[in-house]
Structures are given as structure tokens and as C-alpha cells.
Image (spheres, grey):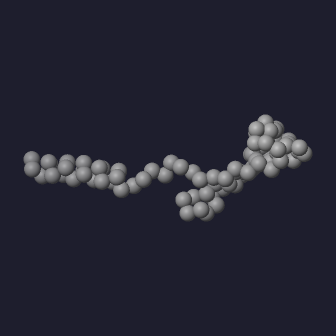
Amino acid sequence: MKIKFIFLLNIILLFVFNSFSQSPQTQTNYIQKSIVKKMGVKTFEEVEALTSEDKNVVIDYYDGLGRSMQNVAWQASPAKMDIV
């Protein structure tokens, strides 16, 4: 009986300390760039209102150390699909 209690206590402590020692990696670092192809666009709102024919949107994803993981060009193909 005492061995079962000690075993159960060790399992509980393992889960408690394990959850505090590791931080979740739920955040992804990224930089989004909009390259405007249309003349006369000057404000952020005007850039956001442009269609994919008038601007190129590129999203660069980085890991926690600043290394590039993935580059995505939004609706950059002729079929308006993303290019990874």
C-alpha cells in the first residue's frame, strides 16, 4: 500500500514539475511585407484595401532564435494560390 502511494505521489509530482519547467511554443514570429505596385498609395489603410493584383504580400516566419523557417508569398501564383 505504501509503495502504491509513493508511486502515485511521484507521478503527480512529475506532471506538476514538468508543466512548470516547459513553456509552450504557441507563438510564431513573423514579418509581413507588402510591396505596392500601384502609384499614389500612401496610407496603411489604402495598402490594406488593395487587391493581390496591386500588391505583393510576403510573410517570413522565424523560429525563436531568429532563423528563417518559411517564406510565403500570398496569392502570388497566376491561379491566386500561395507560394511557399
In this picture, is 68 found above or below 36? below
Q: Work out which residue is located at the far left of the displayed protein and give it.
A: 1
Residue at (59% x, 62% y) in the render? 66
Q: Position of residue 8 (x, y in %)?
A: 20, 48
Q: Position of residue 73 (x, y in %)?
A: 75, 50
Q: Left or right: 82 with respect to 22?
A: right
Residue at (49% x, 52% y) in the render? 25
Question: Splitting the image into 4 quarters, where does residue 42 fall?
Answer: top right
* Residue 83 seen by the camera: no
Residue at (51% x, 48% y) in the render? 26
Residue at (36% x, 56% y) in the render? 21
Q: Position of residue 80 (x, y in %)?
A: 80, 41
Q: Work out which residue is located at the far top of the displayed protein and give it.
A: 49
Q: Left or right: 84 with respect to 19?
A: right
Q: Work out which residue is located at the far right of the displayed protein and give it.
A: 39
Q: Position of residue 20 (x, y in %)?
A: 34, 52
Residue in front for this viewpoint, 35 or 4? 35
* Residue 75 seen by the camera: yes
Q: Count every numbered label the image shows and give the total.
A: 0
